[in-house]
Amino acid sequence: MTSYGYIGLGTMGSAMAENLIGTGAAVTVYDLDADAVASAVGQGATSAASPAEVAAASDVVSVCVPAAEHIEAVMTGPGGIVEGKHDGLHIVIHSTVHPDTMTSARDTAAEWGVPLFDACVAGGADNARAGTQLVLAGGVDDMPPVVADLIDIYARTVVSAGPVGAGAAMKIAFNLMTYAQFAAAATSHDLLLSAGGNPKELLAAWKDAGQLGVLTEQFSGMLDIPAEHITGGFRSMLETQVGISQKDLSLAQSLGQSRQGTDAFIQTIHDAMPAIYGVSPKQENNS
Ligand code: NAD
């Protein structure tokens, strides 16, 4: 039976790990946050003291930490996967990061004789918990069954985006489309409201026309929440979301080139996100 590892038990990682543990598989986990580890252990996982210990116990290790510097720490930092590498180990990175981060990690792991793939995830924590995510994957044609089988546990749909790094590139473009919809929905909401119209009817009309996606509908539902009600855990969740949007839209700016004016468009959405959500981005403290 395949032994799995999971590193990075935040919003997405904890939900994906919960789904994996629920299959009855052996799952060894690690996170800097002891509470996140304790929660996964409570569901049936085994805790490890470092990424190296996770790697040593696993055939396939999933990594879902926030950004490039965290991937580097997990791979080659003190107690990193490098110290637990072995024949038969595979690594799958689920973080939304630049494609260059994925190819650099792939090259590092290749020096150890360890195959590494990108399998970026979309659909949020609920779909992660249910194993019904959209997975945008790189290197699918080269994936051994032990990796493809794991991704099937996570996914409702797997998109084969191209070579390693292509999953990350597609995820960044995918997220830009999502944030552009959020920005358009918020702007239209406010414009219509200030013109004396009813934004709820606008949303219903947009839905009737078949142009309203599920995520944008959920997001639009938050636009009428009074500022004084944005407190506590709800506020914290929004701050995290805004922080992720800033990261993702900065990644979009460095992804490639498009026709004239595109850079300004991404920058405008990037800068508008805190005002659109009504909160400032949470500062990363989990490096
Ligand atoms: P999060 O901040 O909720 O969780 C990140 C976790 O990584 C934390 O538990 C943190 O302690 C841990 N971590 C950080 N550095 C670590 C290290 N060196 N070793 C071990 N653990 C470490 O973030 P998230 O929302 O789960 O997002 C993770 C990644 O997935 C990001 O790249 C994000 O863009 C992407 N993503 C998020 C969502 C979402 O809806 N939240 C959806 C799809 C993809």
Image (tube, rainbow, N blue to C red):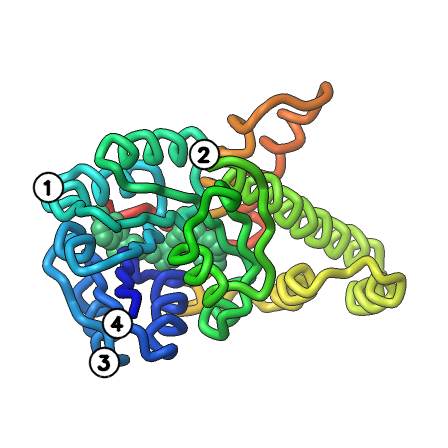
Asked if the residues shown at circle 2 and circle 3 are in contact, with their CB atoms under 8 angstroms apart, the answer is no
Q: Earlier in the sequence, mark 2 or mark 1?
A: 1
- The amino acid sitting under disc 3 is Gly
- The amino acid sitting under disc 2 is His
Q: Is residue 11 above or below residue 253?
A: below
Q: Secondary structure at mark 4?
A: strand
Q: Earlier in the sequence, mark 3 or mark 1?
A: 3
Q: Is residue 258 above or below residue 235?
A: above
User: Do we see residue 243 in this rendering?
Assistant: no
Q: CA separation, marks 1 and 4? A: 25 Å
**Left-right relation of 50 to 154:** left
Count residues near mark 2 (Cα–Cα under 10 Å), then give few for <14, some for 14-19, many for 20+: many
Q: Is residue 72 above or below residue 62?
A: above
Viewer-nearest of labels 2 and 4? 4
Q: Secondary structure at mark 3?
A: helix
As drawn, the label of residue 78 is 1
**Residue 84 location, x and y as percent?**
14, 48
- The amino acid sitting under disc 1 is Pro
As drawn, the label of residue 49 is none
Q: Earlier in the sequence, mark 4 or mark 3?
A: 4
The residue where tag 2 is placed is 98
Q: CA separation, marks 4 and 3? A: 13 Å
Most foreground residue, 153 or 101: 153
Count residues near mark 1 (Cα–Cα under 10 Å), then give few for <14, some for 14-19, many for 20+: few
The residue where tag 4 is placed is 26
**Residue 7 location, x and y as percent?**
27, 56
Q: CA separation, marks 2 and 1? A: 23 Å
Q: Which quadrant, please, contains the N terminus?
A: bottom left
